[in-house]
Image (cartoon, rainbow, N blue to C red):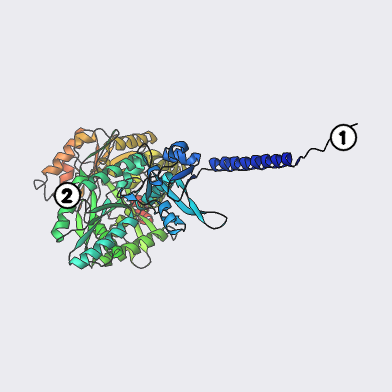
Amino acid sequence: MTLKKPQDNSMVVERLNWQVKNNLLKSSVSRAELTLNSISDAIICSDLQGNVDYMNLAAEQMTGWKLEQAQGRSIDQIMPLIHDNSSAACQNPVSLVLKHSVPVSMVPGTMLVRRNGSTVAIEDSAAPIREPNGKISGAVIVFHDVTAALALAINMSYLAHHDALTQLPNRVLLNDRIEHAISLAERRGSSLAVLFLDLDKFKNINDSLGHTVGDSLLQSVAQRLSACVRHSDTVSRSGGDEFVLLLTECRNTQDAALTAHKLLVSVADSYQIGQHNLQVTSSIGISVYPDDALTAQALIKNADTAMYRAKHAGRNNFQFFRQDMNIRALERESIENSLKQALERQEFEVYYQPLINLQTGTITGAEALLRWQHPEWGLTLPERFITVAEESNLILPIGRWILREACLQARHWQDEGLAMSSMAVNISAREFYHADFVSGVRTILYETDLAPGWLQLDITERVLIQDTTTSTDILNQLKVLGVQLAVDNFGTGSSSLSELLMYPIDVLKIDGSFVHTIRERNGNSKVASAVIAMAESFGYKVIAEGVETPAQLEFLLHQHCNEGQGYLFSGSVAGAEFTKLMRTGLVT
């Protein structure tokens, strides 16, 4: 048997080892490429000349170039960069890496121009590619799309400096602009003005028609205010129905006055909000730099103080700040703080003024009037505090308290068998237009067990004409309850008797200013005569307010006026004293 020489397998083993290593290398490269294509960041590699030799899928999608198309092309061609503000070309970080052999980050605000010409905001970092021996063989840049994040940041910054409802600058941005304007005015030796504008009785609209209508009205007002000033000026909303304006190039107070007058006229024009035709006026306070204050905060505060002076002066006007206004502002703040505690401390009292049948001289009813037993001022009339109560919204709990006390007193007199046809309670505009006013009246009548026909609600003519549609609806709801409705201070508004026919009212109370014109039977009394005659023809019960002299009483009797009240008969008195008047039937 012949023996064969053993075959030399070294070549086979070597070939097998090479194939294994090659497969492992291919597998490693394939896995690395798969990994790079799986991440969301774009990756581009270049050689030492800055030509592209690799791109992952994210880079292809970001740039619009395929790898096979981009290979060998300059990085500047594949990913051209520009500044977002100027659109000027930026140097690609890869060029800097290859030049300086150090990692480089992209300048903020860099935009990538894609192959189709569109742009996208990006952030990146680039670094050199080093061989195991430390030698640089190219560069790699990693970047991602920050368009959404940038837009979110811009939007967040906008929201932080602007009012969400009107899109006007808010107080933060306003303060910044005022401080900047002060610095500029200081260098130039010039002036600037800050105007604080507040809508008059806006709360009534918000309470009666809802926040949707109120918000739409605020947006319309914002547009009108912006149209009244220059582009260099600022109109801001500081909250609620308050707007603050900065006039940066105010040469003198006359410039500010002209702008304020323009604003008043523009705001007072009617608004069509849905089905509602609304009218609203405004009050404006003005402070001037450097005469009134030297800082943004002080200028706004002083303008706010002057605005309240405009409110007290009758609304729908503007007032310049004066140093003596600070005294009034401190008093107002003191009154508001005291009012907040007055209800808890039971400092309020209700006084009653008799209503008199002019033919018989008997007491037919009472009008409930608020008094404040202030711990320092003593017995205080509403003239000193009622405006603050209305502006601070404290009139709502105070008004509810008066109504309840008056109903309880009327029920008490009713239980004692004291004949009286009505208990009159004055209702402010803020109460009347509040969303739960009618339900509040219903609740108080139920809790006090007072027959609705005993309660008379006095609403002034000015309140009713603020929104005739809503006023009619509220009055109809009150009429369903069974209460009496009176138009108070008739003649001080702009409506006519014919316009009042749309309202379901029972009583017309002639304002005392008309009664005061009566000197004698044939004196200056034509207006009062006409009002009484017309009211009587429409079937209203007529009550004359402010009767103070026998001549006035004689005239009213001659005109067949139903009832009257005034100091000729009695002023307002406490409940116990009024009870005595009811028992004796005498009026002092």
Q: Measured from the top left, where is residue 428 in percent x and y?
A: 31, 48
Residue at (39, 51) in percent of width and height = 92
Q: Measured from the top left, where is residue 530 in percent x and y?
A: 14, 39
Three-letter amino acid code of the residue under disc 2: Lys
Furthest residue in direction right, as rendered? 1
Q: Measured from the top left, where is residue 40 in percent x and y?
A: 51, 43
Horizontally, residue 230 falls left or right of residue 350, namely left
Question: Along the line of sight, which residue is nearer the eye, 63 or 12?
Answer: 12
Residue at (29, 33) in percent of width and height = 275
Question: Along the line of sight, which residue is nearer the eye, 476 or 13?
Answer: 13
- Mark 1 surroundings within 10 Å by alpha-carbon count, few (fewer than 14), some (14 through 19), many (20 or more): few
- Mark 2 surroundings within 10 Å by alpha-carbon count, few (fewer than 14), some (14 through 19), many (20 or more): some
Determine the secondary structure under disc 2. helix
User: How many numbered circles does the render carry?
Assistant: 2
Q: Where 350 sits versus 117, above or below?
A: below
Q: Which residue is mark 2?
A: 262
Horizontally, residue 223 falls left or right of residue 401, namely left
Give the CA separation, mark 2 to mark 1: 123 Å
Q: Measured from the top left, where is residue 169 in percent x and y?
A: 31, 52
Question: Along the line of sight, which residue is nearer the eye, 379 or 184?
Answer: 184
One can see residue 355 in this view = yes
